[in-house]
Image (spheres, grey):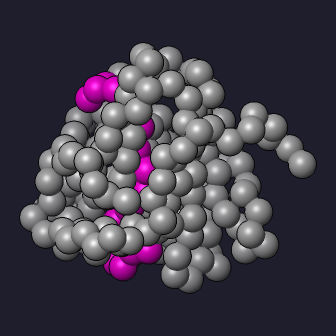
Amino acid sequence: MFENLHWLNEPPQWSATADMLSVSTGERTDFWRQTFYGFIRDDGHFLFREVSGDFTASVTLDGEYEALYDQLGLMLRVSETTWLKTGIEYTDGLPHLSTVVTRDFSDWSVLALPDLRGKVSIRLTRHGTALRVQFQGAAGRWQLSRLAYLPLPEVCQVGLMCCSPERSGFRARFTDFSVTEPVARELHG
């Protein structure tokens, strides 16, 4: 599951088994560009592989959220200025499904998940310049949380991301990671 992957900003502590990646984040790590806060951060942890064309990446996430902005999830990256990250982020005292799309400037959308206890599965699908973010709800159905536009070259990087902008030592766990052919384009039904 984690073979042939490479680190951008390798964390100080991590381990991988056949079915799980465990990470303890470094001090004040993040991916963000300009908007609202006025700073650029590109020191979050990202374990990735290259992928060509359309795909679906999925993973199951579990984290020990304690501090503002503790986060883990999936990332699609072209460069420091063009990327998408999505996953669970701790803000306002609750876990949220969070997505940031960056094209020179970052935007941020969140959906509170007040009943989240434990693991959650998410997936990211590329259909050309359209990126679809979904999470698996309590009923087991994949629910749409974001449909974003991001012009991308044929080859990009995709993989697992985690950050802790306010501290070090956020413990993140990833299981069931896969990159496959894209799911069908139907959004409804």
Whether residue 82 is visible here, answered yes or no, is no
* Farthest bottom residue in view: 117
Q: Relative to 121, is 86 on the left or the right?
A: left
- Examine the rendered structure and indicate whether residue 39 appears above or below residue 179: above
Q: In which quarter of the image is the N terminus?
A: bottom left
Residue found 81% across the figure and 37% down from its top: 186
- The answer to whether residue 22 is left or right of residue 137 is left
Q: Is residue 66 magenta?
A: yes
Q: Residue at left 50%, top 17%? A: 151
**Residue 3 in magenta?**
no
**Residue that sits furthest to the right in the current view:** 189
Most foreground residue, 13 or 50: 50
Compared to 45, does 32 lie above or below? above
Front residue (pair 155, 136): 155
Which residue appears at 46% of the width and 41% of the height?
100
Bounds of the magenta span? 62-81
Q: Which residue is drawn at 26% across and 47% down?
A: 4
Q: Where is residue 55 in the image (x, y as percent from the top left)?
A: 55, 36
Residue 111 position in % (x across, y down): 62, 57
Is residue 13 in view?
A: yes
How many labels were placed on the picture? 0
Residue 135's image quarter?
A: bottom right
Rendering coords of residue 105 (x, y %) = 38, 27
Relative side of 70 to 186, left or right = left
